[in-house]
Image: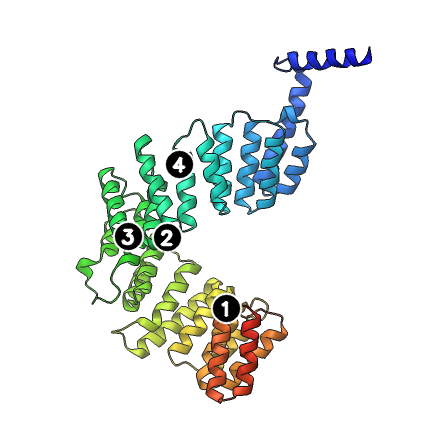
Amino acid sequence: MLRACARACLLSSRTYSSINFPTPPSLNLQTNNLLSQVRALATRGQLNQALLLFYTLQPPTHCNQTYATLFHACARHHCLQQGLSLHHYMVAHNHITPPDLFVSNHLINMYAKFGYLHHARQLFDEMPRRNLVTWTALISGYAQWGQAVNCFRLFAGLLVHYRPNEFAFASVLTSCGDSYDDGYGRQVHALALKMSLDACVYVANALITMYSKICDHRAVYDVSKDEAWKVFRSTESRNLITWNSMIAGFHCRRLGAQAIDLFIQMHLHGLGFDRATLLSVFSSLNGSNGLDDIVVAKFCYQLHCLAIKTGFILKIEVVTALVKAYSDLGGNIADCYMLFSETSCHRDIVAWTGIMTTFSECDPEESLSLFRQLRRENLAPDRYTFSIVLKAYASLATEHHASAVHSQVIKAGFGG
């Protein structure tokens, strides 16, 4: 009898599970308030609190908007494990069947940002319906993680269905500039011209970066043939990234004088700059052919003052670049060490390797002393650090110590 009743109840629940019974207004109001709190917490970056509240709600009350907000927050705040758990929870409870386009787009974006491109592609392939955001999210993921071939192929597939937006163009151009044949980049540029998207600042910035990477660095510089400079000059609505891209483009082609001149123009126009600007300009000082060494050294000092005035001197990357610039320009090694010492709370292995490089030729014993000090601070040397140490030992001709370092190199996994 009990079994018969149980079967009857089960059949009744299956029969009526597809019927949407009206929910009392008070319950709807309470649920909506809780979901609003979840979205508010996630938007403010309090993701763990948002998820804790979300999981306490009854599953039927969950909605697409809330899932999308949480997946977006996971991607934005680099919370991979929380995103994976949330996706598993959603699938396990069959909350969204078939997959909602809005939620799926956020899922693809999350997996793409974390480099889980296989997961993102599987979701993409399984979607019954896609829109431009879907395609662009996966194209951006391929570009971000250096999968140029997949990026370009997906972009070609997008053209069959939609008119690409500026973000899709920018992603594929960035990918072409990194590792793909420059012919593909020029084809994408031609398409952007045809669609009048080349003037968009995102596309222009990507074009500057692409042309800076694919140019012949060995050729004598000819401004009339500089495609990156042509794009920069023709871009009317430039932003900080536009200027940084062009300065970085000059730097990567060892055109330090042009990078310095552009930064001066930028400063004279009253435009702001950021950490990336300073890093490119400091790195360009050693390649400033055609400028007097005294002029370059004076400019380096002025940049140093500017970094102090703006507070960027507190950034370890800026200090490291400044130390290298002073060292390359023949500055006082004691001044370089003082700069390094003033960053004691923020020093990383790049900073240590930089100051060791400064000492390696003029004072190899001090370079080795710095190496021992970084080991005492429990920092893990990388292959560049070890190469500087071996160079210092070679200068001192101490085979026994060099062999000891070699054993550390092998132990650290850099001996292959």
Q: Nearer the viewer, residue 406 or 29?
A: 406
Task: Give the Cα distance between marks 3 and 4.
Answer: 22 Å
Q: Nearer the viewer, residue 312 or 344?
A: 344
Q: Earlier in the sequence, mark 3 or mark 4?
A: 4
Task: Give the Cα distance between marks 3 and 2.
Answer: 24 Å
Helix, strand or loop at mark 4: helix
Q: Earlier in the sequence, mark 3 or mark 2?
A: 3
Image coords of residue 79 (percent x, y):
58, 46
Residue 315 visible at all:
yes
Residue located beneath label 4 in the image: 135
Q: Three-letter amino acid code at disc 1? A: Val
In the displayed structure, 416 sits above or below 335; it is above
- What is the number of the mark on residue 350? 1
Q: Nearer the viewer, mark 4 or mark 2?
A: 4
Task: Give the Cα distance between marks 4 and 2.
Answer: 25 Å
Residue 166 visible at all:
no
Q: Nearer the viewer, mark 3 or mark 2?
A: 3
Q: Three-letter amino acid code at disc 4? A: Trp
Q: Nearer the viewer, mark 3 or mark 4?
A: 3
Residue located beneath label 3 in the image: 181
Is 96 placed left or right of 310 in the picture? right
Helix, strand or loop at mark 1: helix
Query: In the current view of this chain or complex, which residue is farthest to the bottom?
Result: 397
Task: Give the Cα distance between marks 2 and 1.
Answer: 25 Å
Helix, strand or loop at mark 3: loop
The reply to whether discs 3 and 4 touch (Cβ–Cβ < 8 Å) is no
Q: Three-letter amino acid code at disc 3? A: Asp
Q: Earlier in the sequence, mark 4 or mark 1?
A: 4
Residue located beneath label 2 in the image: 241
